Image: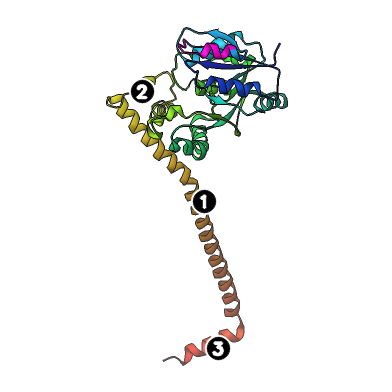
């Protein structure tokens, strides 16, 4: 029985699946199985999966949540690892996952970050420089770090306990399960534990790419709901109200992200100024107190009192 099961949902992934499975075959950890869940593909996805010796299963219900749950049902490993068909994994990916769970018995789920290896330059730069601030911002609103579907691992026992992925969601099913996992145990996100994934979701540009996720993200942050507003992120049309609404929300999210990225620096500058001002006030008060004490001592001297009295008598 394998220690780890790697589950890869796939829908018409003939362009990417080969690279993903090739990177899995090159892992330095060997005690694992690969499960490819074909989600109604019409291209050569199934043939590629068989070529690499993966366990191939089919899921007729369309959606990544259905596909991931189907793979988890037949998985034999005690650790369920999830990634996407367009993702390339580093050689030590599985060994690091196994080591993390062995070293921390309280850990129920582990995740990492990602970086785009294709797509518009704006999206690739965003994944390199803005993803980390966004994840911290997401942590602030969510109450903890959330996992990413392309780079996540969950203990089988914990996965079954929370009931798997929410099949009612078209997006953010990886984030939603993170909320439920945090309720039963420790969820860790290592931002230095990275995989490479394609930027195809941003093929039309950074703004339009973010527009697919901005509505559900905003409503999740401020209304704590996942099951509502999914319509805003599915099949967006630029000329429709939904498309324009998503576009505006994506702009708001970017501005908000930049503001939050710069805010800590502003806060640090304010703290430095505040500390300097407080120091100056403290020195001023200390000097004033010392001056008053010295003046009081001098004023109480007998010869000074007599001299002062004489001066007052001489005055007209």
- Location of mark 3 (residue): 307
- Location of mark 1 (residue): 268
Q: Nearer the viewer, mark 1 or mark 2?
A: 2
Does residue 235 show up magenta in the picture? no
Q: Is residue 33 above or below residue 268?
A: above
Q: Is residue 296 left or right of residue 213?
A: right
**Measured Cα–Cα span from mark 1 to mark 3:** 55 Å
| Region in magenta | 40-50
Q: Can residue 90 be seen?
A: yes
> In terms of image quadrants, where is residue 253?
top left
Mark 2 crowd level (few <14, some 14–19, many ≥20, 10 Å Cα):
many
Q: Nearer the viewer, mark 2 or mark 3?
A: 2
Mark 3 crowd level (few <14, some 14–19, many ≥20, 10 Å Cα):
few
Q: Can residue 183 be seen?
A: no
Locate residue 91, reporting x and y percent.
66, 28
- Location of mark 2 (residue): 232
- Residue at 50% x, 35% y is 127
**Split into 4 quadrants, where in the image is the C terminus?**
bottom left
């Amino acid at each position: 029985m394998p220690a780890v099961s790697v589950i890869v949902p796939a829908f018409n992934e003939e362009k990417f699946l080969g690279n993903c499975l090739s990177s899995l075959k090159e892992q330095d950890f060997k005690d694992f199985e690969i499960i490819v869940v074909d989600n109604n593909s019409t291209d050569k996805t199934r043939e590629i999966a068989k070529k690499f010796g993966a366990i191939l299963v089919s899921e007729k219900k369309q959606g990544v949540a259905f596909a991931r749950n189907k793979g988890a049902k037949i998985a034999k490993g005690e650790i369920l690892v999830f990634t996407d068909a367009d993702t390339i994994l580093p050689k030590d990916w599985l060994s690091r996952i196994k080591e993390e769970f062995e070293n921390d018995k309280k850990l129920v789920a582990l995740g990492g970050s990602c970086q785009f290896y294709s797509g518009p330059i704006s999206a690739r730069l965003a994944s390199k420089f803005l993803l980390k601030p966004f994840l911290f911002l997401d942590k602030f609103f969510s109450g903890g770090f959330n996992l990413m579907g392309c780079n996540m691992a969950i203990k089988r026992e914990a996965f079954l306990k929370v009931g798997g992925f929410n099949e009612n969601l078209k997006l953010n099913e990886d984030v939603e399960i993170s909320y439920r996992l945090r309720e039963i145990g420790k969820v860790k996100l290592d931002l230095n534990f990275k995989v490479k994934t394609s930027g195809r979701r941003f093929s039309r540009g950074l703004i339009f790419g973010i527009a697919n996720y901005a509505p559900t993200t905003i409503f999740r942050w401020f209304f704590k709901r996942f099951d509502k507003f999914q319509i805003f992120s599915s099949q967006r049309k630029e000329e429709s109200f939904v498309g324009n609404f998503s576009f505006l929300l994506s702009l708001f999210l970017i501005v908000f992200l930049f503001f939050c990225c710069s805010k800590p620096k502003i806060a640090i500058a304010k703290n430095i100024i505040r500390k300097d001002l407080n120091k100056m006030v403290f020195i001023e008060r200390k000097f004033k107190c010392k001056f008053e004490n010295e003046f009081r001592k001098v004023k109480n001297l007998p010869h000074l009192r007599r001299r002062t009295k004489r001066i007052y008598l001489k005055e007209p």
